[in-house]
Image (spheres, rainbow, N blue to C red):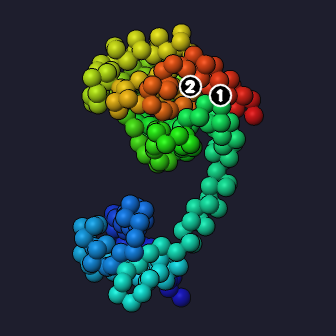
Amino acid sequence: MPARPDPSAAKPPSMNVKTALRVIEIIETFARERRALSLSELSRLLSVPASSCLALIRTLTSLGYLYETARRQGYYPTGRLLAMAQQIARHDPVLDRVHGTMSELRESTGETIVIGKLHEGHAVVYLDVLESPHAIRYIATAGERRELHANSIGKALLAAMDDAERAALLAQLPFQPFTARTLATPAALEADLRQARERGAYVNLSESMPDVGALAWPVRLSGESYAISIAGPVYRIEPHLERYAAILRAACAALEKI
């Protein structure tokens, strides 16, 4: 009896990747627009043919991730997506371990707390963000990426590398300027990292965005390098650098013992 063809083999890998990307883009579009969207609106926002968009919507609807709010009035995600995300988050091996510590840091500083790690060898990816309760605060979202040279977490991750690995990476970075205070060369960044080790915190004061400040410290979890930062307006961060640095170093040291 001949073997049945594998349905997944019918599509080339590039097509499967494109389809997966489109699904993520649909989810992100709903998150950004925060309203029901018609087929034509989704097609326009995603810059894809209506026929391709319809096929994806029908699939997501049949799986229970989207529903039609009213006939011809658009689609919106169901609670299934949130339920699945919560299930995943509850069992994250890293975030479950650090969440309590991040909450304590937010409580003791009143500022936004972020954990991140190296992304594809050349950027920082935020894994989790606990926002400050202040009306004026640093706002970020898990999954966002930042440049290594202009980010406190990026600096902490660079400092955790051995000299040869860091030098090779810095030679490849474009050192994009974001503000007048952005470090512009590998030599300037290396000097900053040396000062940071002595200071006890890797600091970004208006280097990535005007008036935004942050300090970070590396933490080793299950053999991998991560870093945690305390971020907020410069006028609140800068006067408390020494105290926040001591709190952050103690928190990271405690995490490594768990």
Residue tagged 2: 217
Q: Position of residue 67 (x, y in %)?
A: 47, 81
Q: Give how far across and how far down residue 213 sits, in percent.
A: 44, 28
Residue drawn at the location 41% of the way across and 66% of the way down: 34
Task: Please tell me which residue lies in front, 34 or 173.
Answer: 34
Residue 143 lies, with reference to residue 104, above or below; the image says below
Residue at 48% from the left image edge and 33% from the top image edge: 232
**Which x, y percent locates residue 83?**
61, 67
Determine the image quadrant of residue 145.
top left
Badge 2, how many Cα within 10 Å: few under 14, some, many 20+? Answer: many
In space, the residues marked 1 and 2 are separated at their CA atoms by 7 Å
Q: Secondary structure at mark 2?
A: strand
- View extreme (front): residue: 135
Which residue is tagged 1? Answer: 252
Residue toward you, 221 or 193: 193
Residue 197 versus residue 118 in the image, above or below: above
Element marked by disc 1: helix
